[in-house]
Image (cartoon, helix red, strand yellow):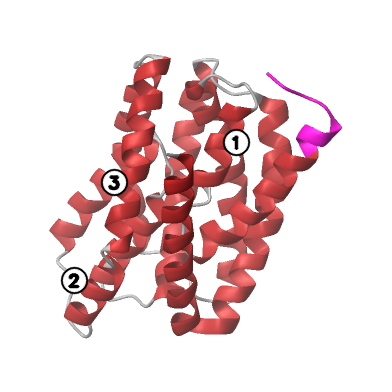
């Protein structure tokens, strides 16, 4: 495991970018998780360590969104609760697979989620659900599945949650508020499970978290200030950037 001032500076900078991107759209873990592995952390330890920044980042984001009055606290029932139950299942699975298996699964999931976002699910479900009442049983099941994915690997889960909140009839500003609230709650459970399994490098995680918390505040400010159309544009750019990154990695 690599340490030192330059490493911590790199982690802080990566956290700043990832925290901003995570709040606006999603996909910041596509940057931080591979970076932690590159710095010498075993994949499952990198997966657990990444949750430190995610948890603190979303704590700050929920606080900031609540100040702007756009947090729908009822989402705890239909979004955060099933997501947390799913996350417990996903985290258990992540802790019980081998390092090589997890690395292979991570690569496949990164490619799969990127292809999914390039399919433009947000645009499709939004055009088909404006003004319609959400299917709550379907949303509860959907958030459970999202929670399983988020508990297992986290990377790219923001895009999936925004698709679910769009199905619920929320615009991308309020959908982002539901997203950060749901991720905050289920990540707390995942982090405790990873820590109990000895899969968290706290030094790396806290430096990364310092960057993601600062980035989350910038992301909330930009989301509320710029509105739905601007966020949709950032989502598109983020998706294209992630796709190019994956191609370059190959």
Reading the image, the residue beneath label 3 is 112
Residue 39 higher or lower than 198, as above or below? below
Q: CA distance from mark 1 to mark 2?
A: 38 Å
Dot 2, how many residues are within 10 Å of its Cα: few (below 14), some (14-19), or many (20+)?
some
Q: x%, y% of residue 117?
A: 32, 60
Residue 214 higher or lower than 108, as above or below? below
In the drawing, does residue 151 fall left or right of residue 29? Answer: left
Reading the image, the residue beneath label 1 is 35
The reply to whether the magenta stretch includes residue 7 is yes
In the drawing, does residue 36 fall left or right of residue 192? Answer: right
Instruction: Tell me the residue at 74%/41% (across/down).
Output: 10
Q: x%, y% of residue 64?
A: 62, 66
Reading the image, the residue beneath label 2 is 134
Instruction: Tell me the residue at 49%/71% (across/down).
Output: 234
SS under mark 3: helix
First-in-chain label (2 vs 3): 3
Q: Nearest the camera: 29 or 147? A: 29
Q: CA distance from mark 3 to mark 1?
A: 20 Å
């Amino acid at each position: 495991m690599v340490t030192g001032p330059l490493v911590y500076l790199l982690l802080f900078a990566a956290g700043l970018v990832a925290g901003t991107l995570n709040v606006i759209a999603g996909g910041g873990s596509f940057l931080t998780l591979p970076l932690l592995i590159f710095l010498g952390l075993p994949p499952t330890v990198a997966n657990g360590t990444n949750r430190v920044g995610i948890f603190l980042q979303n704590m700050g984001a929920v606080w900031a969104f609540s100040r702007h009055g756009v947090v729908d606290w009822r989402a705890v029932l239909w979004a955060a609760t099933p997501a947390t139950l799913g996350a417990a299942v996903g985290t258990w699975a992540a802790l019980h697979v081998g390092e090589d298996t997890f690395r292979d699964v991570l690569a496949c999931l990164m490619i799969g989620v990127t292809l999914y976002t390039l399919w433009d699910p947000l645009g499709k479900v939004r055009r088909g659900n404006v003004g319609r009442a959400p299917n709550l049983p379907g949303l509860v099941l959907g958030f459970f599945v999202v929670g399983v994915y988020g508990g297992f690997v986290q990377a790219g889960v923001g895009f999936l949650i925004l698709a679910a909140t769009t199905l619920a009839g929320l615009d991308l500003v309020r959908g982002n508020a539901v997203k950060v609230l749901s991720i905050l709650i289920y990540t707390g459970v995942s982090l405790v499970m990873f820590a109990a399994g000895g899969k968290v490098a706290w030094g790396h995680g806290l430096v990364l978290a310092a960057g993601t918390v600062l980035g989350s505040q910038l992301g909330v400010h930009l989301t509320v200030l710029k509105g739905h159309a601007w966020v949709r544009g950032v989502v598109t750019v983020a998706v294209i950037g992630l796709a190019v990154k994956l191609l370059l990695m190959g």
